[in-house]
Amino acid sequence: MIQFPQKRFIYHFKLLHLHAENEKKAKMEYIETEIKGVLIVEPKVFDDQRGYFFEAWKKEEFQRHAGPVEFVQDNESKSSYGVLRGLHYQKGDASQAKLVRVIKGRVLDVAVDLRKDSSTFGHHVMVELSDTNKRQLFIPRGFAHGFLVLSDEAIFTYKVDNVYAPAAEASIRFDDPDLAIQWPIDMSKVVTSAKDLRGVAFSDAECF
């Protein structure tokens, strides 16, 4: 009869159990929004006296919820209060899926559904992203995207699954009346680019 070293067996069992519990606790939460395909991603944050730790992205887990998205590039921008970037997208096959988050500050992030065959065509999702809530927003292909900075400064970072294509670049006016996005600051305080001010009306936009 084989004799197992009992103490060692119990020790390894406890380690495996602890590892399984930590894996369960570390899993991010994927929250469906009112627009199909757009997901809010909430990480599990571990805090202690040293600071915090969390998994920001895990390919296998992400693709299980969002589908077979292959990110090819990470981008980052820095903006001050009142800066509004958007509503941007790339047309046709150059369209980009994005996973966006804020590593410093606070922004209001908006995704507009441009998929003609969608029941939510022309609708939008609005989510606050900040370095406090550490939420991320996944925006699939076929959407226009923009954000407004609500803090003194914001550092915004995002993954994309397609490279920038200047010839396919497009922009819709952030204050388009048909979209009726309720930006929560006085529009006279908005800081944006000349290019974004030349954005087209939603009714004239080339959609998917």
Image (cartoon, rainbow, N blue to C red):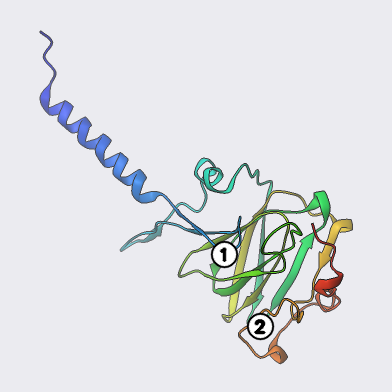
Query: Sequence order check: which comes first, mark 1 or mark 2?
Result: 1
* Position in image of residue 46 (x %, y %): 36, 57
Relative to 148, say whether 23 is above or below. Answer: above
Relative to 36, say whether 78 is above or below. Answer: below
Name the residue: 69% across, 48% down: 161
* Position in image of residue 80 (x %, y %): 64, 79
Find numbered disc 1 in the image and state the secondary structure of the residue it sits on. Answer: loop
Q: Kindly identify which numbered label has been placed on residue 34.
A: 1
Find numbered disc 2 in the image and state the secondary structure of the residue it sits on. Answer: loop
Amino acid at the residue labelled 2: Gly
Name the residue: 65% across, 46% down: 71
* Position in image of residue 106 (x %, y %): 55, 74
* Position in image of residue 119 (x %, y %): 67, 61
Relative to 9, say whether 56 is above or below. Answer: below
Amino acid at the residue labelled 1: Glu
Name the residue: 55% across, 62% down: 33
> Within 10 Å of the Cα at label 1, are there few (<14), some (14-19), or many (20+) other Cα atoms?
few
Q: Kindly identify which numbered label has been placed on residue 172.
A: none
Q: For the image shown, how many numbered marks are present on the structure?
A: 2
Name the residue: 30% across, 40% down: 19
- The residue under label 2 is 82
Relative to 207, say whether 18 is above or below. Answer: above
